[in-house]
Image (tube, helix red, strand yellow):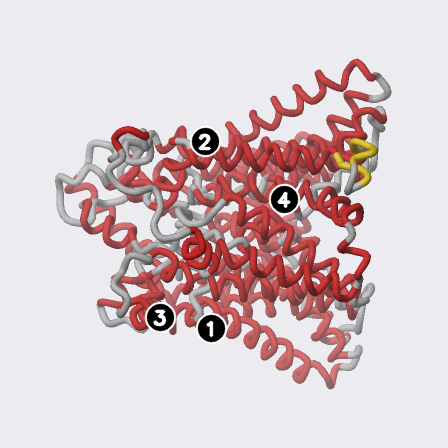
Amino acid sequence: MSAVTSQDTGRAGAAAARPRTRAGLSSTALIYLVLVAVVAVSAVLTGIEGRNFFSQGNIWGVLTAMSVLGLIAIGQTLVILAGSLDLSVPYVVSLATLVAAGGMKGLDGNVPAAVFNTLLLTAAIGLVMGLLVALLDVHGFIASLGIGLVISGYLATNYQGSHGAAAPDFRLLSRTGIASMIPASFMVMLLCAVLVTLLLRYTRLGHHLYAVGGNRAVARMSGVRTATPVIAAHVLCSLLAGLAALLLVSRTGVGLPTIGSQGRYDLLSIAAVVLGGTLLAGGKGSVVGTIGGVAIFAVLDNVMGVMQVNPFLKDFVRGLAIVLAVAVYARRSVVRRPPRFGPGTAAAPAGTAQEAR
Amino acid sequence: MSTTTAPSPTTRGLPATEGTPAQRIIRAAITPGGAVFVLLAALFVAVVLSNPSFGEPPQLIRFIGRTAPIAIAAMGQYYVIVSGEFDLSMGAVVATQVVIAGNYIGQDEGRVLPAIGLMLLVGAAVGVVNGLATTLLKVPSFIVTLGTMLALGGLVDYLTGGAATGNPVDTFRELGRGGIEGVPVVDVLPFSVIILVVVAVGGVLLMRSPFGRTLIATGDNPDAAGLAGTSVWWIKTRAFVLSSLSATVAGILLVGYAGVHPSVGQGYEFQAITAVVLGGVILGGGRGWLLSAAAGAFALELLFAFLNFREVESTWRDTVQGLIIIIAVAVAGRAWTVGRSPKQPPDPPPTTTPTTSAATPNPARPGTDTGEH
């Protein structure tokens, strides 16, 4: 993405330097500046409470909180880049925890099979969604909402309360880490982020993903098979949600039919993606930015936890933070959008406003 | 846009309608917006077959009264969706209004009218915030309304502690619960049905006014509408205000049905969106009819009633709802092409529509983007 951004900036700088006041600052850099500011404020607030934000335990907590939402948000980034949306993630996560924990039955020997089954199932769900979006022309919002509701009905009918048990070895995963500061789950998330970034930057699939998300009709006329990237994005998104579910199972030890919807992973992951500077309409954005967005959420949550903010008030703060952050960001992205066909086309913001939806 | 939509009776250039009424009805019925009425009729027959007493007027009118809140919310959501945006804050607005009603009115009858005024004011304020943040700050409406949803919902839960508080006086609850007694055929005519009819008629008139025409034009192509002289931000903001006001009205009715609890409005936004989509309105804006959105809400509730009478476990409701919206949208995406081109020569439509359907959700946009720059 940053490659795309810098290129954009270069062209924009040549064509319309005037509207941009804070020139040279890429969108991703801005996110991380905000993150640094949030961390600084949080450190001060935590200090006032008489605790250390940078203590081993606290860092561990923040990074653990990042890993699940991070994995889901990486998948969501792919889907949103392709111009779709995935609202089914919370239900996919819940279902995956049930399948994983139910398959393990508390025995170490069952772990490989259970993990394989979980990932296969989630990939299949993603495939169905991708086919609906790409081939049947169902809006991603509806396809994923529909699939999510279908799964939710299945869960509500067949599962009450927790189900299955994670294998002891598998549970260790949530406790291992580097220097009791960086949990293994965070490393998993980071690895996925790197892999997806490489996918987006250096493979044909990744480039086609941006092309299809930017403008499907143009991509098709340019000879891109528009269905493949969309389907791949949905499969990867569901797969990553399944991976996040495995992390959750290793942490909770059981499968829970409501763990996904309680975490509000659908809306929060979308918010994190948009916070990370990805255009909700698709075609522009990066995984690096998304991780920044997730980190902002995790730090906010952590400091509110330390300050013992009422959990209901947390939602209020979260909602406010989303709108404010995106308001700051969205204005920029509109201004920074380069004109498409050379200089002298000042009408670009209008087009972007419509796309930014 | 507005110049073509003000048909003054003296200088009419084009005929207002084409074909005989029967032709027009058939033509309308094959669009998704019309098909939902066919679906509604089919479902109604199915429900009556499995439970004959449902068809009796008193039962039926009570069902309509029960469905009124979601139908009103769906019509509110319609304004926003047809203008090309989303409103996810609806459920939180409903919860807010319900809690305001519970806590402000209490047992004081004199406060009923001021409370309704206050609630409408709060609703309008939320709509203005949503609208301005979407149009002027250029934040995607999905994110703005998600933010208001989290913020309002969190605030309401915080203030009430997440539990039911307050109990408004019965005269207020009568609005949602009661009705005019002794009406000939239907026995009791619920107030909620009257409110639904008023809202629907007002909405239809509104959509036929210059505002309505401009709203659809804006949803179809905001750039073109802007260039044609529409102030896009004001049109869209008004759509958000209408949506929040509809949620407010739904909240007022729900106080009577469901009582005061911060969870009353939960999931209302997605249910309203489902109803709108089921009514054949295209996400992304510019296509669809107001009454189809209301019909979508009724179809959904009828479907649930049908499942109920068939003794399907209520936990499967979600699954059915999910399948329905996927099928509805998959069909609708194709079918609007048929509905949109009735004037084409008779040979092309049947053959060309399936192939061009890939571009139907927003046929105007790719063209305008490249043309404008």
Closer to viewer: mark 3 or mark 2: 3
Q: Chain of mark 3?
A: B
Cα distance between the residues tagged 4 and 1 = 31 Å
Left or right, A60 with respect to B235, comes to right
* Residue bearing the label numbered 4: B71
State whether residue B354 is above or below residue B295. Answer: below
Cα distance between the residues tagged 3 and 2? 36 Å
Which x, y percent locates residue A287?
43, 57
In the image, what residue type sits under mark 1?
Leu
Image mark 4: chain: B
Mark with earlier residue (3, 2) = 2
Identified at 56% across, 77% down, the residue is A124
- Residue A57 x, y percent position in the rendering: 68, 50
Which residue is located at x 82 percent, y 26 percent? Answer: B168
Query: What distance separates the C-alpha of mark 3 from that of mark 1?
Result: 17 Å
Point out the image quarter for the C terminus of chain A.
top left
The residue nearer to you, when weighing B84 against B58, is B58
Q: Position of residue A48 (x, y in %)?
A: 67, 30
Q: Nearer the viewer, residue B314 or A105?
A: B314
Q: Which mark lies nearer to you, 2 or 4?
A: 4
Q: Nearer the viewer, residue A79 or A20?
A: A79
- Circles 2 and 4, Cβ within 8 Å, touching? The answer is no
Left or right, residue A318 beside residue A211: right
- Residue at label 3? B354
Q: Are marks 4 and 1 in contact (CB under 8 Å)?
A: no
Name the residue type under label 3: Pro
- Please state which amino acid type lies under the numbered disc 2: Thr
The residue under label 1 is A131
**Residue B237 - label:** 2
Tag in front: 4 or 1: 4
